[in-house]
Image (spheres, helix red, strand yellow):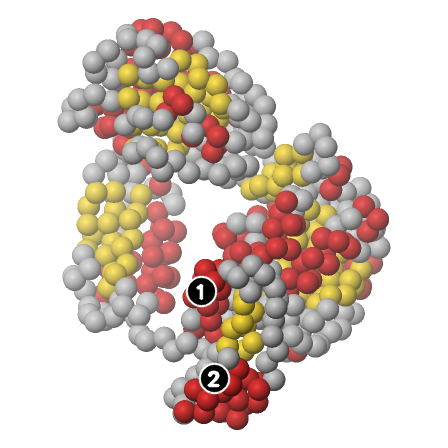
Amino acid sequence: MRDFVQRVVEKLTVEENRDRVSVVQYSKEPEAHFYLNTYTTKEDVVDTVRGLRHKGGRPLNTGAALQYVRDNVFIASSGIESQAPRRDVVFLLDGSDGTRSGFPAMRDFVQGVVETLGVDENKDRVAVVQYSRDPAAQFYLNTYTTKGEILNTVRGLRHKGGDLSTLEQLSMDQSIARKDVVFLLDGSDGTRNGFPAMRDFVQRVVEKLTVEENKDRVSVVQYSKEPEAHFYLNTYTTKEDVVDIVRGLRHKGGRPLNTGAALHTQSIAHIDTFFEWLFEIRERDDCHVKEAALSCFSLTYASFNKTIFSEHSHSLVESQAPRRDVVFLLDGSDGTRSGFPAMRDFVQRVVETLGVDENKDRVAVVQYSRDPAAQFYLNTYTTKGEILNTVRGLRHKGGRPLNTGAALQYVRDNVLTASSGSRRTEGVPQLLILLSGGRSFDNVDTPAAALKELGVLIFGIGTRSSDSRELQRISHDPSYALSVSDFTDLPNIQQQLLSSVESVVIDVTPESTTDLGMCHHC
């Protein structure tokens, strides 16, 4: 096999702007020996191919290897040449009464995105639609062919105003002669304060329906760890009966929040229309309903707090004395030498915002390249001054290749432990902030999953040299993967990171695990 590859490469014209070559070997897991942009001469490629060693291992996972090639090799950062993109981009803007104060920011956002596009009749095209009760196209994909025309129009957009009445329209739509409506209510511990408002909302929607045996039918299911049907679609045949029962609903309570199990409950197995009320989107299980053809509306607290709720029911960590264990994992490989001072300054600025104390926030720093090295542990220092002094004196580690997977495993096994100062078993949030300047040469998925199983909230920050998909897989959620052009731009995302860190929600189980999420409704 190796000789065959060598003979094929000998026939190619390997140059930066001509033919490029990559080799991936796989068994149970794939491993890239080199990427399309690793070598620019035939000699380098052939020399490396001659030195290839058999990987070994089983079973043979060809599917995973093909997916790996698609996600990690055939991408621009690995050397594949990209042609000028052609994209049709439509912005759908909420212009209802509730967004009046925020509309200028929405408009600026659209403007900022358009600035990054290559607008041309044969390249990127843009359209903007604003909606409240009814949609209105501000301009279509073929209206403008230059970026300047689009930006001028976007700058002049005016707020539309009006109600968002999707639910009322659905409930009164006479074209839907018979509707089966199921309300799935989050009854977990985190919704106790807001439950009366949820109950009132259900009541108001039911009032709009025509509840009869051969017309509209209603069911209500409340769930937390397990679902519980308050009544089924065939339990009541009059609106009065349904409304009376809804008025008497009591909050269920319990944790964790298992939305997937609730979605698979028998009462919603074969229905046409289904309302889902989620207070927090923090499922512990899979949330897929592919068997049934459902019209799903997921209503979040953030969307309706102005019209439905009179009080906030935040599930934030106690604000008077936050306790967090924060670990910085810094890429110290050869590729980050010039950017390391900016990384160091970033760590310093974040630490400045923390309340460092033995019984409040604790900080650890790990630097890695081929191997990880702890600069200090969570229980090494108890004052902010000591931490800042040490951070200021950090020296770039150097080395290659970049083994992010090994570093993540090191943090799990050696830093987030009780002996190193971790308070995970006490229910203290565990935060890992990764700064990476390149693609990892080892597997990151398994150690990242192991950290997440411990309840560690991972933020991934990368540069244009990083693999964005890899960072998204490592992070607690893809939205927690942040990107900068290079490390000198870290101040641009500092506030975004700090806002996320300050909004950590903690759900502590009586045993020794900590489930971390984000506050989606603050």
Mark 2: give few (<14), some (14-19) or many (20+) Cα within 10 Å: few
Residue under numbered circle 1: 66
Query: Disc 1 on helix, strand or loop?
Result: helix
Q: In this view, does 254 lie to the left or right of 393?
A: left
Q: How many marks?
A: 2
Task: Give the quarter of the image for residue 475.
Answer: bottom right
- Frontmost of labels 1 and 2 is 2
**Residue 1 visible from this viewpoint:** yes
Residue 393 on image: x %, y %: 78, 69
Residue shown at 55% from the left, 84% from the top: 49
Dot placed on the residue nearer the N-terminal end, 1 or 2: 2
Identify the residue at horizontal 43%, vertical 25% (top origin). 265
Nearest the viewer among 505 and 48 is: 48
In the image, residue 152 lies at what x, y percent?
25, 63
Q: Which amino acid does label 2 sit on?
A: Phe
Rendering quarter of residue 90: bottom left
Q: What residue type is labelled 1?
A: Leu
How far apart marks 1 and 2 lie (CA) works out to 20 Å
Residue 187, above or below 230? below
The x, y position of residue 364, in whole percent, is: 75, 56
Q: How crowded is mark 1: few (under 14 residues within 10 Å), some or many (20 or more)?
A: some
The answer to whether residue 194 is seen in the rendering is no
Locate residue 447 relative to residue 391 in the image: left or right: left
Q: With respect to residue 157, does 189 lie above or below? A: above
Query: Which residue lies under the disc numbered 2?
Result: 4
Indicate the secondary structure of the residue bearing disc 2.
helix
Residue 332 position (above or below residue 362): below
Q: Which picture quadrant has residue 401? A: bottom right
